[in-house]
Amino acid sequence: MLYRFERFSCSISEISRYWHKIASDEMEKYGLKSSHAVYLATLSRYPEGVSSCKLCEISGRDKSDVSRMVSILESKGLVFRKNESANLYRAAICLTDEGKEAAEHVQHRAMIAVDMAGQGLTEDERETFYRALDIISENLRVLSKDGLPK
């Protein structure tokens, strides 16, 4: 049982470290960090814009992280807020033309990375892997909220 814990923990840490390194290399040309890649990719799926509140929900990040990342993306001219007069947190965050180009770059490069990372997996194995990852993620979310049983 402890071996599974160690293997899981080490694998997740290693995957995260490599992902951040690859994403960081790709985001460097925009003067951004690896974590911005997820925001650009996510925002590209919502051409009409998405609120900070919704972005928190989609990305699984907290309000302060979303606010900080959006502020940086705004300062780089990659996003803008629609309907600012309503409320900054409720205003729709949209990609600028330059932001759309950056998001397209991120998506293209991410697709290459995901394809290469999954080499050697069959479609069935890939499907099982993502289903298992979703289940583990949800179980850990509940455990982190409710705590481990006594």
Image (cartoon, rainbow, N blue to C red):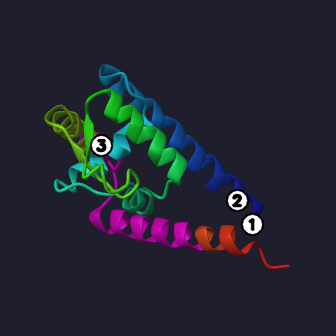
Which mark is drawn over residue 110? none
Which is more N-terminal, label 2 or label 3? 2
Name the residue carrying label 3.
40
Q: Residue at x 67, y 67 (%)?
A: 144
Q: Earlier in the sequence, mark 3 or mark 1?
A: 1
Percent position (x, y) of residue 85? 30, 51
The answer to whether the residue labelled 1 contacts the one labelled 2, judged by CB atoms less than 8 Å apart, is yes
Q: Is residue 87 left or right of residue 15?
A: left
Magenta-highlighted residues = 112-139
The amino acid type of the residue labelled 2 equals Phe
Q: Residues within 10 Å of mark 2 (few under 14, many from 20)?
A: few
Query: Residue tagged by mark 2?
Result: 5
Horizontal side of 56 relative to 146 (left or right) equals left
Residue furthest left in the image: 97
Image mark for residue 1: 1
Q: Residue at x 48, y 65 (%)?
A: 133
Q: Nearer the viewer, mark 3 or mark 2?
A: 3
Q: Secondary structure at mark 2?
A: helix
Q: Horizontally, is 101 left or right of 142 in the view?
A: left
Question: Considering the numbered disc 3 on the image, is that residue within a helix, a strand or a loop?
Answer: helix
Tell me if mark 1 has few (under 14), some (14-19) or many (20+) residues whose alpha carbon lies within 10 angstroms of its own. Answer: few
Residue beneath the point at 34% across and 34% down: 73
* Up-down relation of residue 9 to residue 78 (above or below): below
Identified by mark 1, the residue type is Met
